[in-house]
Amino acid sequence: MKLLVFVNVLIILLGFTSCTQPPEYPIEPVIQYERTTKNTMIQGDGTEDETWMTISFTDGDGDIGFFKEGSTQVETDLFIRDLRLDAITEKFTIPFIPELGTTNGISGEITFRMYTTCCVFPEWVPGQPAPCDVSADYLVDTVRYEIYIKDRAGHESNRIQTEPIYLICQ
């Protein structure tokens, strides 16, 4: 009899622990910088070199990604700003993530490829080397990127910065 009571209590306790609530996330996406595959690249204006970057995200209402099968709506929702130039230099489209279950809070990782860029020489004036030229005065440039995402409702995430990436200017 005691064994039967113990088993029933154990089953009830297991039932309570299996009904845990999913995590509560804010409706605005929240991102965090995770990693870069390498932090040194040879400068270029195309696909001469590359690194892969990974960010993690959470979103309370799960409305990440714009493109849906059969839809013509494609929007950019991942933005990369080169802090040297104070300009958005890359935009990506996150694949559409369908709503799941009764709660739509989601989390995950996004990995994307960043191609190399040109070195930016300080105080550039005509007659000096232009970006992507070789200069004996500037052997290495450092670039950091700011990253943010936008969900389908237009909520912007926090903005994060990458670790420094060193561009070999030669």
Image (cartoon, grey):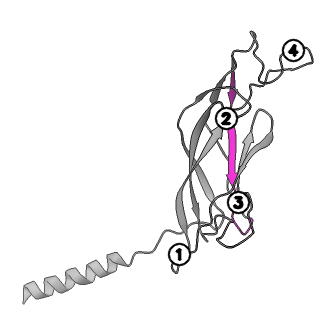
Residues marked 1 and 3 touching at CB (< 8 Å): no
Mark 3, mark 2: which one is toward the viewer? 2
| Residue at numbered disc 2 | 47
Work out which quarter of the rendered image holds the C terminus and state it: top right
As measured in the structure, the alpha-carbon distance from the residue carrying label 4 to the one carrying label 2 is 25 Å
Left or right: 19 in relation to 135 = left
Say which residue appears at 77% left-offset and 32% top-offset.
84
Residues marked 4 and 2 touching at CB (< 8 Å): no
The crowding category of the residue bearing disc 4, from other C-alpha atoms within 10 Å (few below 14, some 14 to 19, many at least 20), is few
Q: Secondary structure at mark 1?
A: loop
Say which residue appears at 52% left-offset and 37% top-offset.
37
Residue 141 locus on image (x, y percent): 70, 23
As measured in the structure, the alpha-carbon distance from the residue carrying label 1 to the one carrying label 3 is 19 Å
Mark with earlier residue (1, 3): 1
Q: Nearer the viewer, residue 79 or 103?
A: 79
User: Which range of residues does the magenta coloring cover?
Assistant: 141-154
Three-letter amino acid code at the position of disc 1: Leu
As measured in the structure, the alpha-carbon distance from the residue carrying label 3 to the one carrying label 4 is 39 Å
Three-letter amino acid code at the position of disc 4: Gln
Mark with earlier residue (3, 4): 4
Is-magenta flag for residue 153?
yes
Is residue 156 visible to the viewer in this orientation of the structure?
yes
| Residue at numbered disc 3 | 150
In the displayed structure, 86 sits above or below 109; it is above
Left or right: 146 in relation to 51 = right
The crowding category of the residue bearing disc 2, from other C-alpha atoms within 10 Å (few below 14, some 14 to 19, many at least 20), is few
Mark with earlier residue (4, 1): 1
Mark 3, mark 4: which one is toward the viewer? 4
Residue 100: which numbered mark, if any? 1
Three-letter amino acid code at the position of disc 3: Lys
| Residue at numbered disc 4 | 128
As measured in the structure, the alpha-carbon distance from the residue carrying label 3 to the one carrying label 2 is 26 Å
